[in-house]
Amino acid sequence: MDAILSSKEIIDGFVQAHSIHFTEHVGIEKDAIYWAHTANVVVHRFYSKIDDHRLEDPSIGLLLHLLDRTFEHVDGSILAYVTGCAASSEVVARAGMESSLNVRYILSGDRLARIYAYFISFIESSDRKINLWSRETSGLSGIEAKAHSDSILTRKSYLTSVKTVIDQMFAQVSSTTHPKEMKWPNISDRFTAVGESIAYRTVYARMSSQTHNDAEDTINYLIGVISGNEELLVQGAIETVNFSRFLVNYGVSFFLKSCIKYCEEFGLIEAINHLQKGKKVVDQLVQVDAAQIGAR
């Protein structure tokens, strides 16, 4: 495999890309930054070497696009953490974890059929939301009613056009499969399908709680205030930040799993070996974080 960028080059690139200064926090998270970025570089280098015949399979490019979006979330979660936005880092880490999951789920079966189901799920979900939107605005009148009505029609027209394009594309590339027979499963079933049901019930569930702004952190703060114990408050704050770090690093590990799965599916052995080294490093970070936060 071609030489990968050095840790210094990647860290410098991270700092410059996000217009921040190198700080102690950036230095502490250098391994997570390095391996998230290295995974992205490795996958792209592999993709650039795929021959034209193999690229006739549209799933290769579509999944690369999904991995790129996943990387943005993972990178964003690290950025939020090192710039003092620990709570927000959990929200972005959740988006990255779900995106990583989607890539792994698609790669674990009939890729084209699952991509088709992924697309159609978006269209059907959007259509249901539009119907609810229309229902909620049915009592409006005048300019306000017209503004909503025009927007609804525009959105419906867009979805109809998208559905036509998707059906046409898959009619051309899926002659030996039946993608329309497959449904996009719910989040729990996707985790189960890739052997990650425990992660769904534990790590992902905790990420989701921050996304929905549940009361746990506020309750813990309230207990600390009521106790009048300053040390307890400080310890609670430290554990909360460390827990955010745990979730961010777990999200990086999940991203590396999706990159490894991508390389396994399309046969880049050297890349797999390199990424597995990175996953071991990040998994060690996760273990250290878990030991520091205790049971939460």
Image (cartoon, rainbow, N blue to C red):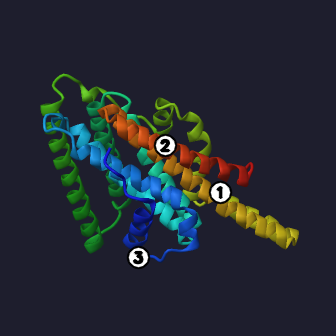
Q: Quadrant of the N terminus?
A: top left
Q: Callout 2, which amino acid?
A: Lys
- The percent position of residue 80, horizontal first and vertical second, equals 51, 67
Q: Callout 1, which amino acid?
A: Phe
Residue denoted by label 2: 277
First in residue order: circle 1 vs circle 3: 3
Q: Quadrant of residue 88?
A: bottom right
Asked if the residue under mark 2 is in contact with the one under mark 3, i.e. CB atoms within 8 Å, the reply is no
Residue denoted by label 1: 243
- Badge 2, how many Cα within 10 Å: few under 14, some, many 20+? few
Q: Callout 3, which amino acid?
A: Ser
- Badge 1, how many Cα within 10 Å: few under 14, some, many 20+? many
Residue 267 visible: yes
- Mark closer to the observer (1, 3): 3
- As helix, strand or loop, the secondary structure at mark 3 comes to loop
In the picture provided, is 193 more to the left or to the right than 281?
left
- As helix, strand or loop, the secondary structure at mark 1 comes to helix
Residue 257: mark: none
